[in-house]
Every structure is written in C-alpha cells, then in structure tokens.
Image (cartoon, grey):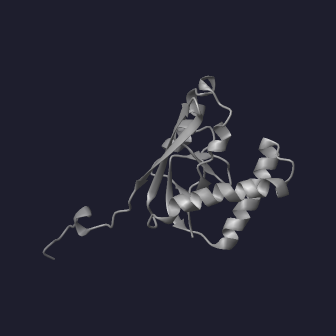
C-alpha cells in the first residue's frame, strides 16, 4: 500500500503557506477544508493553500509537493484515528466513532491516487472553484534515475 509524504526542495513553502507542513509527514489533498469557501476567501496565503496545498496529517499545514512511498497498515490506521480526531476538534464531528469512516475514506482516496505510481513519484494538486464546488486535479512527476552525466567528474593525472 502507498501514501505520500511532504517533500521540500527549498524554503518557499515556509513563505507561501500560513502553516507549512513538516518534511516527511504523511499528506492527503485535504480539499474538505475549502468546501464552504467562496472567491472572497481566496486571498494571500489562504489562496495559495487552496490553489495547490496538500494537507499534512501531523501539523495540519500545507505543502506544494508530496512523494509517493510505502505505508504499513498499522500506520494507516493511526492516521485514520488522527484525522478523525481532527474532524471532531476542528470541524465539529459529533465524536471520533462518527468521524472515523470519513477519515478512512479520505485516506483511501489518497492510497488509490498513489497506488499506480512508483515510489518517489512527486504529486502536485491544483484546485479551482466551480459552480459545482471545489474541483481538484493531480499531476504526477515520475522519479528519474540519476545517471553519471548528472554529476561533475574531476579527474587529475595524480
């Protein structure tokens, strides 16, 4: 089974998101955060989070890119519990038992998204507001194997 972890190539996420996700934390799209948003909500850093931010499942921060990797069933169950608790605390779900099936479904959608990709494939999300609600699209950037031509070789006669 596969899921995705936050990855950073530079410090840009620390500047474009109110709360950047931590490198290595498990992520999902997290589009549910924007389900009641309108054009007036899309300003500044909130717009950036809406437009292309994945949701980290530990910090509840956002990240631009995630990398596909393997996950164990026990870890996935732990994430479902964390996400269910988040739904209770932040979104007013009645209790963890009621929220857990929704959390499991969110994680299942992400594992389905990751399943056909090789490990280390990068994923990006793009969102837009439509008359029907939030529309999400995904882009995969396949991992490239490093070749010798990608490294500078310095040879001396010594």
Please tell me whether residue 13 is drawn above or below residue 116 in the rendered image.
Answer: above
- How many numbered dots are placed on residues in this image? 0
Tell which of 90 and 1 is nearer to you: 1
Task: Give how far across and how far down residue 135 sits, in percent.
Answer: 54, 39
Residue 147 visible at all: yes
Please tell me whether residue 134 is drawn above or below residue 111 in the rendered image.
Answer: above
Quadrant of the snapshot with the N terminus: bottom right
Tell which of 120 and 132 is nearer to you: 132
Please tell me whether residue 3 is drawn above or below residue 74 in the rendered image.
Answer: above
Quadrant of the snapshot with the C terminus: bottom left
Task: Give how far across and how far down residue 38 sits, in percent.
Answer: 63, 27
Location of residue 109 by image quarter: bottom right
Location of residue 5 by image quarter: bottom right
Location of residue 49 by image quarter: top right
User: Residue shown at 86%/52% (left/top)?
Assistant: 95
Residue 24 visible at all: no
Outermost residue, bottom direction? 158
User: Residue shown at 58%/57% (left/top)?
Assistant: 110
User: Residue shown at 67%/50% (left/top)?
Assistant: 59
């Amino acid at each position: 089974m596969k899921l995705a972890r936050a990855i950073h190539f530079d410090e840009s996420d620390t500047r474009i998101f109110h709360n950047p996700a931590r490198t290595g934390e498990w992520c999902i799209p997290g589009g549910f955060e924007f389900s009641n948003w309108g054009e007036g909500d899309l300003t500044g850093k909130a717009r950036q989070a809406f437009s292309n931010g994945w949701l980290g499942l530990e910090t509840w921060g956002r990240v631009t890119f995630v990398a596909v990797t393997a996950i164990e069933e026990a870890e996935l169950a732990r994430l479902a519990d964390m996400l269910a608790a988040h739904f209770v605390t932040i979104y007013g779900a009645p209790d963890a038992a009621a929220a857990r099936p929704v959390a499991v479904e969110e994680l299942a959608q992400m594992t389905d998204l990751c399943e056909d990709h090789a490990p280390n494939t990068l994923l990006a999300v793009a969102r837009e507001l439509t008359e029907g609600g939030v529309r999400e699209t995904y882009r995969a950037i396949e991992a490239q194997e490093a070749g010798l031509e990608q490294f500078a070789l310095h040879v001396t006669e010594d």
